[in-house]
Image (spheres, rainbow, N blue to C red):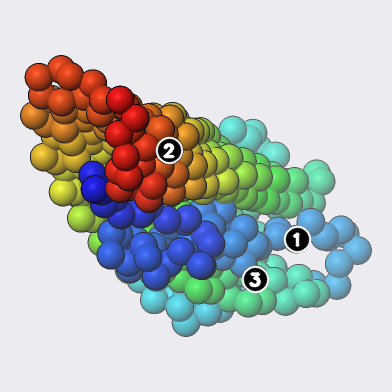
Amino acid sequence: MEFTNEQPVFVKFLSRCFWDCMKKYISTEAITHLKKDASMKHAAKSIKTNKEPLDKDTGRYENVFNQEDMIKYANDNVKSKWEELGDYKFDEHSQFDQSKLEDRSLYTCESGTKYLGQWNIQENLKQGKGTQVWTDGSLYQGNWENNETNGLGRIIYTNGDVYEGEWLNGKPHGKGIHLKSDGSKYDGYFCQDAYKGYGVETWTDRSIYEGEYHDGKMEGQGMFIWENGGRYKGQFKNNNIHGHGKYEWSDGRTFDGQWENNKMHGYGTYVCKDGRKYEGQYINDKKEGNGTFFWPDGRKYIGQWHLGKQHGIGTYIALNGNERKGEWINGLRIKWLS
């Protein structure tokens, strides 16, 4: 006889070969979320600030002085997002000596990039508050130093993505918020344009991940909650459930133990809603090796398992405590040995 009929419990976040079997447990939209790389490097085109030798540049100044006039040079998607968000509020607490800065009219570089804002008078570099529109129509408003985005600022990318927060040498670095054009959002820490450290990522179907990131991916301790109520809390690696953690299904089942690439792998405890429980080894999402199965009424099976079923030598313990050793093949007892 076969005591259990466990279904596959999870799926790889990234490997396509598991998507079909996943659909019966996790929503299609949640799967889509997990396939996305959390890195800003993949979420939007990286924008590099132009550190040009302005004393030798053949650019020109134009008779434009109003920051809002810069919007007309932006991409249509950028204009629409800017109108939705409103004008950027510059940081009023400047770290620079204002006596060394001056406001200038619109400057168009030889490359076509347009900048309106403050300059370091002595070094002739962008420094202080400024607005820049790149040739692709991306728009940045915020602080500058040494011709690069530094400090606090906001950029609207041509695909409608938005990053607002801290910058270092032309890249998101520090605390910031990444609003994606699909409605998802990341609020946390960045390092050189990638999610790194603690962050919270949310999606339009109300799925949420809260925890650690490394090089733009979920890695370390974290918790993922799906829109259907399922949740996992534990270790992640390279955007996968990997290490020790506990998964709770929306129907009441739980598994607390070792995971490898989104599958139960190693020692763990699986508990069904009706009270049935298994404690033992798993390989590739299946009971394998030695383990103990408990029935709610007190009966137990202690022995060998293969591909999720009793297979080999085991001991059956009845309600009255009597023990009988037997042999099982593919979940069926073929004979008693005692």
Q: Amino acid at mark 2?
A: Gly
Quarter of image, res 56: bottom right
Q: Secondary structure at mark 1?
A: loop
The residue furthest bottom is 76
Residue 312, label in figure: 2
Asked if residue 100 can be seen in this view, the reply is yes
Asked if residue 74 can be seen in this view, the reply is no
Per the image, the residue denoted by label 1 is 50
Quarter of image, res 338: top left
Residue 196: x, y in percent? Answer: 56, 39
How many residues crowd mark 1 within 10 Å: few (<14), some (14–19), many (20+)?
some
Residue 280: x, y in percent? Answer: 39, 29
Query: What's the CA distance linking mark 3 and mark 2?
Result: 68 Å
Mark 1 or 2, which is nearer the eye?
Answer: 2
Per the image, the residue denoted by label 3 is 134
- Comparing 129 with 335, the one in front is 335
Q: Secondary structure at mark 2?
A: strand
How many residues crowd mark 2 within 10 Å: few (<14), some (14–19), many (20+)?
many
Q: Mark 3 or mark 1, which has the lower sequence index?
A: 1
Q: Are marks 3 and 2 in contact (CB under 8 Å)?
A: no
Query: What's the CA distance linking mark 1 and mark 2?
Result: 69 Å
Q: Amino acid at mark 1?
A: Asn
Left/right of residue 64 with respect to residue 79 in the rendered view = right
Q: Mark 3 or mark 2, which has the lower sequence index?
A: 3
